[in-house]
């Protein structure tokens, strides 16, 4: 007789998972949380950046329509010259914003500074949207416009350095160029959104007369509303580990004094930025007026060419950033420096002489592909130069000074030289600025292999 098979006891305690399995699961969960937090933070910082640049560039995109409301003159080029002067004034105040917001970001945190920055931008856009015209209140109208632009300039002056610092610090070292390139993706997207808003209003919603009379206020109201959304997005971002590590040291910090101990890095930021910012504002902000007044395209054609080229330009930024993660930042910058020095005058001359919108688009795209060698990597290069305790200030202040002198005045200089009958001088001016930056690229160290961001990461790992 076969005895019945014994059943295993059911009341034995469950075998607890091994320490190794539990540790592995906790490590996987922590990694997944870290990836989610990083992506959420990059998205939050990028969306806020997009909104800020939309608000700032709406001024330039719609200036053809509201120039007469604030600076009435029989000569439309004089009207544009006056609005370009106010645009430049917004840049001249940017160093103050870079200084104040950089100090705030290095002392109180990147998240706090980015949140405050988008709040200032919201206020500036709202003031412009409701500002009475010259016909209503006389000279007070351009004064209010100027004050609102100065407020936006303060905001944007702090936005760049803090945003570049934040995105570089939350990115991993292997893909830092790729992730940091999204600063210019969202910057261009903000500019593109401003252009598309103009295109939509031009083609589908309002007539040219309506845009000139009151329709130009709509995009500023939209910008103010978007900035409120950006405020709430940035309040939920995580603070970077680099800043928290500095804050835990409880050391007495004097950011300006510390910054002056890095004269070489400051000089690199200025030289690196000079040609790039001049070319960027020439091919983006000034280009729409150039296409109308020099190429003789219609306003609608100029808007369409600008929108299409900006869209493709935006898409190639991560590609160039990824290339910089493979081959280094310096070769990518050299591409811009060499090609920009050689091709700027021929490209702008050919563009001025054509009367065909598609040809103008192709020439503009060639210029923007060259420019991508600068815009895709310049933020991460600057962030890699400075230690965490002064990084936002070190990136923001010298950059803002350079942009205010060269980038912010590009439209004004180009318009003024055209008014004087010396437009080709402007082409050589842009080319010369790029050549100056090329000399810096040729002699600078490769920031990817001498990154202070990686040194901090190794120090944090050792201390942990």
Image: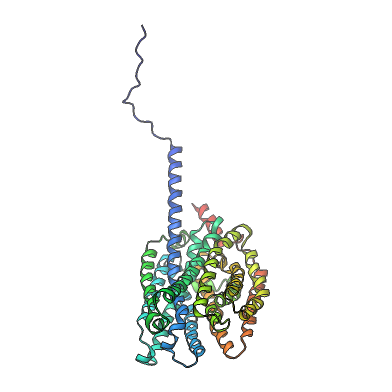
Q: Quadrant of the N terminus?
A: top left
Taking the image as drawn, is residue 102 in sight? Answer: no
How did the renderer colour the structure? rainbow
- Closer to the camera, 355 or 111? 355
Instruction: Decide: is 424 above or below 434.
Output: below
> Going 43% across and 35% down the picture, which residue do you hit?
18
> Residue 296 location in percent, x, y?
56, 82
Instruction: Decide: is 424 above or below 41.
Output: below
> Going 43% across and 44% down the picture, which residue do you hit?
26
> Going 46% across and 49% down the picture, which residue do you hit?
31
> Residue 131 location in percent, x, y?
36, 84
Instruction: Decide: is 94 above or below 448.
Output: below
Q: Is residue 232 left or right of residue 91?
A: left
> Residue 400 location in percent, x, y?
52, 76
Count of number-bearing discs: 0
Taking the image as drawn, is residue 420 in sight? Answer: yes
- Closer to the camera, 1 or 368? 368
Q: Is residue 385 left or right of residue 245?
A: right
Give the residue furthest to the top.
1
- Closer to the camera, 205 or 322? 205
> Going 35% across and 21% down the picture, which residue do you hit?
8
> Residue 261 location in percent, x, y?
56, 72
Quarter location, residue 379: bottom right
């Amino acid at each position: 007789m076969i005895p019945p098979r014994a059943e295993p006891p059911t009341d034995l305690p469950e075998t607890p998972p091994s320490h190794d399995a539990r540790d592995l699961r906790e490590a996987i969960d922590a990694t997944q949380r870290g990836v989610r937090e990083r992506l959420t933070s990059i998205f939050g910082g990028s969306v806020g950046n997009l909104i800020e640049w939309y608000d700032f560039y709406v001024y330039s995109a719609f200036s053809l329509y509201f120039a007469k409301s604030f600076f009435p003159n029989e000569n439309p080029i004089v009207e544009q010259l006056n609005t370009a002067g106010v645009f430049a004034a917004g840049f001249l105040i940017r160093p103050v914003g870079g200084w104040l917001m950089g100090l705030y970001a290095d002392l109180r945190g990147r998240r706090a500074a980015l949140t405050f920055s988008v709040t200032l931008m919201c206020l500036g856009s709202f003031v412009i949207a409701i500002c009475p015209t010259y016909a209503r209140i006389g000279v007070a109208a351009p004064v209010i416009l100027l004050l609102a632009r100065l407020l936006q300039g303060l905001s944007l002056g702090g936005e760049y350095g803090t945003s570049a610092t934040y995105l570089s610090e939350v990115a991993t070292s292997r893909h830092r160029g790729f992730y940091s390139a999204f600063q210019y993706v969202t910057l261009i997207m903000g500019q593109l959104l401003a252009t598309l808003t103009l295109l939509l209003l031009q083609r589908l919603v309002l007539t040219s007369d309506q845009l000139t009379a009151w329709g130009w206020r709509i995009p500023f109201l939209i910008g103010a509303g978007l900035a409120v959304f950006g405020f709430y997005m940035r309040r939920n971002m995580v603070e970077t580990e680099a800043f928290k590590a500095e804050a835990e040291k409880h050391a007495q910090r004097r950011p300006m004094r510390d910054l002056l101990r890095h004269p070489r890095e400051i000089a690199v930021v200025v030289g690196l930025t000079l040609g790039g910012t001049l070319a960027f504002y020439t091919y983006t902000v000034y280009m729409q007026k150039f296409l109308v007044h020099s190429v003789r395209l219609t306003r609608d054609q100029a808007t369409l060419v600008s929108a299409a080229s900006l869209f493709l330009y935006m898409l190639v930024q991560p590609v160039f950033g990824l290339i910089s993660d493979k081959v280094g930042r310096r070769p990518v910058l050299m591409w811009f420096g060499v090609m920009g020095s050689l091709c700027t005058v021929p490209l702008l001359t050919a563009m001025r002489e054509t009367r065909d919108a598609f040809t103008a688009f192709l020439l503009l795209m060639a210029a923007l592909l060259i420019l991508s060698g600068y815009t895709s990597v310049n933020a991460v290069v600057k962030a890699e130069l400075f230690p965490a305790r002064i990084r936002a200030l070190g990136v923001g202040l010298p950059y803002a000074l350079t942009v205010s002198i060269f980038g912010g005045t590009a439209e004004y200089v180009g318009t003024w030289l055209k008014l004087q009958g010396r437009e080709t001088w402007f082409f050589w001016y842009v080319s010369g600025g790029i050549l100056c930056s090329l000399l810096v690229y040729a002699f600078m160290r490769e920031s990817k292999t001498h990154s202070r961001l990686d040194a901090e990461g190794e120090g944090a790992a050792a201390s942990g």
